[in-house]
Image (spheres, helix red, strand yellow):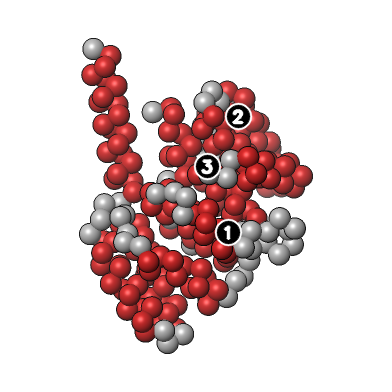
Amino acid sequence: MKKKTGLISLIIPVFLLYFISEACLRCAAVANINPEKVKLDTILNDLPESVRDLVTYRVMYTDLRNNLEKAETEQEKLAALAQLGDYTRDSEEKERIFSRLREKYPSSPEAAYAFVYYFMDEKNPKKIGIPEFHRYLNTFPQLERCNIWAMALNKMVQLKKSDRERLDFMLPLLDMRPEYRDYSVFYTEMVRLASKFGLSNIANKADSLIDDSRLCPSITEVVMEREMKADADKGKKGK
């Protein structure tokens, strides 16, 4: 179970990535932190909002640093490093972490945070364009790929990219047969955008793929089933 921490951290509902704010994403990245460990709830509630925000940030940041130090496997270390890079407010630290993940672990799903960080960022000399991002996406099976699609689309919304740019970015989704129900959210969005621009061929194809995807299991179901099977197999070996 422990070995899969990095993978599980990426498989969260795509709706929470595509349609919510960056602030919510930051909270989701550290949602596994247990506030009971620091016993600060009562104190924090009585602090001014600005002070409370700073204290909460420092507590969570420290917890993420501790998680990184405690990580044992490479996958656990990469997952902890990616979460730290996503959460830190230190721009130099963020750049250092994401540059390392991108350059040294380009085939790792945990590097998704780094690739999204550089994706279409015109102000960053290390910007990642759409072709490079598509190549990164295609190195993974659909299970991991789904959430990375959502992260990239959320980044495009943050950067205020046009509807046409987002539609063009999603076009490769038309060339695959979805294996998970979660992909229906992308095809639904493609139908909406393609209809807006009068692109009936794209809209019709995306619409047919909505039906295909809804016949598939959800990612959550598949992951839970795998985890339960792994636990059962582990229990049998322990007997």
Q: Which of disc 2 and disc 3 is earlier in sequence?
A: 2
Q: Residue furthest top?
A: 239
Mark 3 or 2, closer to the camera: 3
Residue at 42% across, 87% down: 198
Mark 2 or 1, closer to the camera: 1
Q: Which of disc 1 and disc 3 is earlier in sequence?
A: 3
Q: Is residue 178 above or below residue 205?
A: above
* Camera-nearest residue between 134 and 215: 134
Q: Amino acid at mark 3?
A: Ser
Q: Which of disc 1 and disc 2 is earlier in sequence?
A: 2
Q: Position of residue 235 (x, y in %)?
A: 26, 19
Name the quadrant of the N terminus: top left
* Camera-nearest residue between 164 and 16: 164
Q: CA distance from mark 3 to mark 2?
A: 17 Å
Picture disc at residue 39: none
* Camera-nearest residue between 6 and 40: 6
Q: Amino acid at mark 1?
A: Glu
Mark 3 neighbour density, 10 Å: few (under 14) some (14–19) many (20 or more): some
Residue at 29% across, 21% down: 234
Mark 1 neighbour density, 10 Å: few (under 14) some (14–19) many (20 or more): few
Q: Is residue 70 left or right of residue 188?
A: right
Q: Secondary structure at mark 3?
A: loop
Picture disc at residue 68: 2
Residue at 42% across, 54% down: 146
In the rendered picture of this protein, how many numbered marks are placed on residues? Answer: 3
Q: Position of residue 11 (x, y in %)?
A: 42, 46
Q: Position of residue 77 (x, y in %)?
A: 57, 31
Residue linked to disc 1: 132
Q: CA distance from mark 2 to mark 1?
A: 29 Å
Q: Secondary structure at mark 2?
A: helix
Q: Amino acid at mark 2?
A: Leu
